Image (spheres, rainbow, N blue to C red):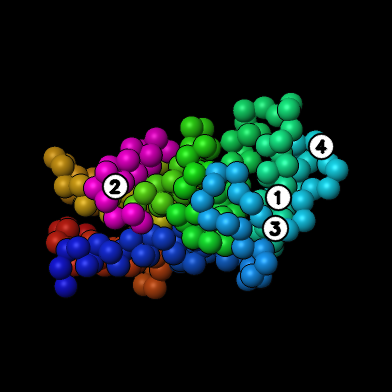
Amino acid sequence: MNRNHLGLLTIVTIILLASGCGGGGGGSGRFTLPGEIPSPGGGGGTGTGTGGGGETDPDALIASAWEDFKFGAYSSTISKFNQVLTLSDITDSQKTDAYNGIGWSQTKSAGVESGYSAFSQAATTQNEARIGLAAALIQRGQTSGFLQAIQTLETVGLGNPSFKFQSTHPIGVSNAEAHAMLAFCYFWRKSTDDEDKAKSQIKIARFEDPSNDSSVAQIYKTLKDMGLQGI
């Protein structure tokens, strides 16, 4: 199996973990019903579920939206976050939280690419959005995407193997998975010291997630098959 084929298999794994289907979990709540799936693409989202009604307090809407998110009601989640974005008195923090929530809701219901625009809006300050944006860039399978994904993941702090990514919301991506994503990107780039960086990243990921049937395990196996030594 050639390097490109192995790489594509790992990209699929990364897409799955970012969508909450990998070893790191996510998958909370029921399956999304057909009528709840939002239209892919636009950062604002266009969910068709019920919104926040007449609520005008942004913090209350954000809290309610994340509660819906936990139960898989993604169109309602998107509708409430969109309502936050229509309010004239929201702070920059509330705005990026809303875009982050839209990105992850679109990812869970329609795939990580559908969350790209919203993640881009929130990635200036939100580490969760940076993780989602990196996954969307990686799944495109383009060199430019890998380079941007590395920069994005390093902005989170993951360039330091001892850094621990902790999500505030139940997005379903663990610290181990985030480090494994970066390990794969480093090995794919193959610049000076990238193999050593990849080793450090995948070793910490495997230390935290030693199971044999997780997304981390799949990325670890792929790196070994692609020729990464010393792991």
- Upstream in sequence: badge 4 or badge 1: 4
- Upstream in sequence: badge 4 or badge 2: 4
Q: Which element type, helix, strand or loop, lies under badge 3?
A: loop
Instruction: Using the numbered discs, state the Cα–Cα distance from disc 4 to disc 1 in whole angstroms.
Output: 13 Å
The residue under the point 33% across, 54% down is 140
The residue under the point 39% across, 73% down is 213
Residue 64 relative to residue 120: left or right: right
- Is there a contact, CB below 8 Å, between mark 3 and mark 1? yes
Pick whichever, 24 or 5, lies toward us. Answer: 5
Residue picked out by circle 1 = 79
Residue 159 relative to residue 104: left or right: left
Q: Main secondary structure of the magenta part?
A: helix
Mark linked to residue 146: 2
Q: Nearer the viewer, mark 2 or mark 3?
A: 3
Instruction: Magenta stretch: give its range.
Output: 139-160
Q: Position of residue 24 (x, y in %)?
A: 48, 62
